[in-house]
Image: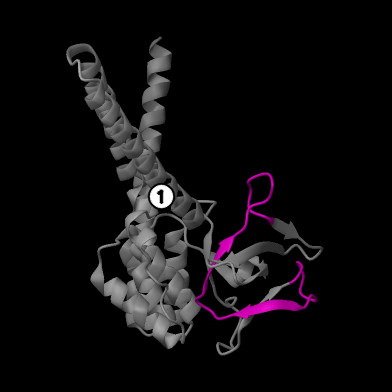
Amino acid sequence: MKLTIKLYCIFICAFILRSQCAGGQEDRLFYDAVRTEAAGDLDQAINLYLEASTLSHSANLHGNLANLYFKKEQYGHSILHFRKALLLNPRDTELSANLNFAYEMAKMPPPMQSFASNYFSANFLSFWIIICAIIFWTGLLILFYIFFFKTSKKTFLYFTICWVISCLLSCFAACLSLQQQSELYREVIVHFPQTENNHSKTIPLRRFAGESNSANTNILPGESLIIRLGNDGVSKSHQIANGKTWYLANSADGKKKGWIREDEFGWIIDPNS
């Protein structure tokens, strides 16, 4: 028993020490990147920020990365990291303004904010689930009260109809938010690979996976795509002979569709994180 307690304590101490070391390393990389950026070495600063992002994420980190990519006129990468920063701090008006400016410089209109995206976004999923639960249980209790203590059948009928409609509407709202959350986890921002120097051309979405296939359509760096799901509910992908993985994707409105190489986009939410 004593041995078990000692092993448990050692495990807890090792976990805490590891967490502190990881946090310290992320902070060191972040401030090294800040100093490197101040010295004018933007490429090295980007590498340090990217290394820090493998350990933890913050709005400041991704905001700084987005600004660096903006300075290098790599607007696809810039838009990607502004989106990541806003996901972590959605109320930051400066980040929102910078994102819109990045879209403008990329010669693209910012995504339209529809009623559904404003009030049924992934951020509202917990809210709608709570509302749905409150409506269901409160209405059920009131129905029991009316049934056992009141004699008016008309009141019972009217309230039941209103309760059912309210439950259906709140469940529908929760389903919309759940759909938005599912798409957020599969949303990617198109950009050129790090080795790409030409920032003016478009990126093709191929008809089939592979470099030699013809383009189904073309998209600009910074555009948003949704990775499609296969019949097994997993992102539809295909790995070709050279080891590169290709993903089947479409635009949010469904008008553009095709295969895109893994190094031609970045995930809003990394599936491996």
Q: Does the stretch in magenta take in 212?
A: yes
Residue bearing the label numbered 1: 177
Q: Percent position (x, y) of residue 164?
A: 35, 33
* Foreground residue among 25 and 95: 95
Q: Is residue 109 left or right of residue 31?
A: right
Q: Quarter of the image holding residue 27?
A: bottom left
Main secondary-structure element of the magenta-colored stretch: loop
Task: Kindly state the secondary structure of the residue where label 1 is placed.
Answer: helix
Vertical order, 183 against 151 (above or below): below
Q: Is residue 102 left or right of residue 265?
A: left
Q: Percent position (x, y) of residue 135?
A: 28, 33
Q: Does the stretch in magenta take in 125?
A: no
Q: Which residues are the magenta region?
A: 207-236
User: Residue at point 60% right, 76% down?
Assistant: 193
User: Residue at point 61% right, 84% down?
Assistant: 202
User: Residue at point 30% right, 62% down?
Assistant: 90
Q: Amino acid at mark 1?
A: Ser
User: Residue at point 77% right, 70% down?
Assistant: 210
Q: Does the rendering let one see residue 133?
A: no
Q: Residues within 10 Å of mark 1 (few under 14, many from 20)?
A: many
Q: Quarter of the image holding residue 212?
A: bottom right
Residue extending farthest top: 1
